[in-house]
Amino acid sequence: MTLSIPLVGCEETLTPPARRLLEAARELVERGEATISGGTVGTAERRAENSPVRQSTRSSTGTGHPGLHILAASRSVLLGGDLLPLTRLEFDLLMHLVAHPRRVFTRLQLLAAVWGYEHTGVRTVDVHIRRLRGKVGADVPLVTTVYGVGYRLSDEAVVTIDRNS
């Protein structure tokens, strides 16, 4: 089935049935049972725009490791003031995990939400998680592996987001 629903900027004008349909579609995507395609904005970006953001209140000096600072508008990530060279998919993966801080995602759910399709091997997610961890460094907790299930944002992750930079 194909639905054409505007996902950004007009939810307040939707009728109650359209709003329920949109919520049902979002739930299907989150569970990995559906995908969103089309448009010019990536799925992870749409979800991050419409989701509460985890803002850390801990200082990076109190945790023993530097925190990540995401500049959403410029799609840049700083680690202790240094720019991290993230690819588009690494950035989208990070934004998706940060948008859902306590949620565990299977590899298929991450493929659907970040890549927008499930037609590639699930090990693609493992490779991108490994690269993201490598760029951030072993001493900075970021992504937790939930064995037999998938991945989630680490409870110890110190992440701030600046949506205007």
Image (cartoon, helix red, strand yellow):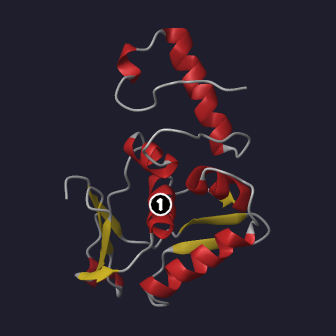
The amino acid type found where label 1 is placed reads: Asp
Query: On the image, which quarter does residue 14 sit in?
Result: top left
Q: Quadrant of the C terminus?
A: bottom left
For numbered disc 1, what is the local secondary structure? helix
Is residue 146 visible in the rendered structure shown here? no
Q: Residue at x 37, y 14 (%)?
A: 13
Q: Looking at this view, name the residue that lies furthest to the right.
A: 148
Percent position of residue 121, x then y:
76, 66
Percent position of residue 156, x then y:
46, 73
Q: Residue at x 52, y 70 (%)?
A: 154
Q: Residue at x 66, y 57 (%)?
A: 111
Percent position of residue 47, x then y:
47, 44
In this picture, residue 22 sits left or right of residue 61: right
Image height of 7 relative to 127, above or below: above
Image height of 108 relative to 144, above or below: above
Q: Residue at x 35, y 67 (%)?
A: 159
Q: Quadrant of the N terminus?
A: top right
Neighbour tally class for label 1: few under 14, some 14-19, many 20 plus, Cα within 10 Å: many
Residue on which disc 1 sits:
92
Which of 63 and 37 lies nearest the eye of the viewer? 37
Percent position of residue 92, x then y:
47, 60
